[in-house]
Amino acid sequence: MRQLFVFLFVVLLSGAIFAAPCVAAKIKHRDTVYKDSVDLSLKQPEGVGCSDGYFVVADTGNSQLVRYSMTPQALTPESVFPLPEASPIIAQVSSKGEIYVLDGKSRTIIKISQEGQVTGKLKPKGLTGSKTFIPRSFKLDKDDNIYLLDIFSERVLVLNPAEEYVKHIDFPEGYKSFSDLAISQQGRLYLLDGVAGALYVANPSSKSFELFSSGLKEHMNFPTSLALDSHGTLYLSDQNGSGLALVGPDGSFLGRKFGMGWEDGQFYYPSQVCINDRDTLIIADKNNNRVQVFNILED
């Protein structure tokens, strides 16, 4: 009873603090998945990796990956890839169907074939400066270049698909704590500082980051994951605020979506968010032990 009271109090407090006008963007709930292909319930899933025809869930509490096929008619769990020694927390899917997973235990990135076989770990070649790196997050662009958010050397490392060093961009001065990054179709690189409530950006030819949007702490609690839709709108998963915040292509705050709860379109400590080329939005609803899928609709 006491836990229920505390939960309801947090719900009311969250709504009071982060109330905001309705977001203009239309996001329609499509479906929610709770189980894998052998009917095992998802357990605190933290990661989701997007592709046009399927998506992959980092089912953290069960130490496995689950792949779901995605057609206009249905979402179907089709494969389970066990990772018994790992704690998968972030997933990405390459253009060739290879899966990259960040292991929260070892802080290494595991590579998995489309058939579910572990093929090794990501090993950057030809790094300059420190040879040690600790990825907090990572993303793949449309050409399968790899962007590592390296919290050890305080930089973003850029590798080509062969894992060879291409370049790096140092973190900007005065940052608090970076939690995620995102790459636009045009190659713009965004950094999310969840503690400071700020976004930074670097253009493809830039050698440094510049402030893109600040003051976001007024509208959200602790954003931890970042994704872009086809129109350049940024979607921030607000973990402690149990919702989603939107920032426009010009850096302006567009408002919040969703809230805390158990119903479809409500969240309890959401984690990674991803958006595929068809503007399907997928969110790991961690503490509700499920993944929710939405369609982003044109105005």
Image (cartoon, helix red, strand yellow):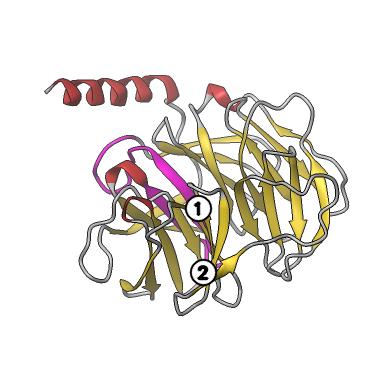
Q: Which residues are magenta?
A: 260-285
Question: Which disc number belongs to residue 51?
Answer: 2
Verify whether residue 282 appears in magenta. yes
Number of numbered discs: 2
Query: For the point 37% across and 20% down, which residue is it?
Result: 16
Verify whether residue 264 appears in magenta. yes
Is 217 situated above or below 244? above
x%, y% of residue 180?
Answer: 60, 43
The amino acid type of the residue labelled 2 equals Ser
User: Looking at this view, is 132 or 168 the one in front?
Assistant: 132
The amino acid type of the residue labelled 1 equals Asp
Q: Quadrant of residue 67?
A: bottom left
x%, y% of residue 129?
Answer: 85, 45
x%, y% of residue 4?
Answer: 17, 26
State the residue lying farthest toward the left. Answer: 1
For residue 271, side relative to residue 1 (left or right): right
Which residue in the protein does label 1 denote?
103
x%, y% of residue 11?
Answer: 30, 26
For residue 81, side relative to residue 200 (left or right): left
Callout 2 crowding tier (Cα within 10 Å): few <14, some 14–19, many ≥20: many
Mark 1 or mark 2, earlier in chain: 2
Is 111 situated above or below 42? below
Query: For the point 31% across and 41% down, which residue is it?
Result: 287
Disc 1/disc 2 C-alpha distance (Å)? 20 Å
Question: Which disc number belongs to residue 298?
Answer: none
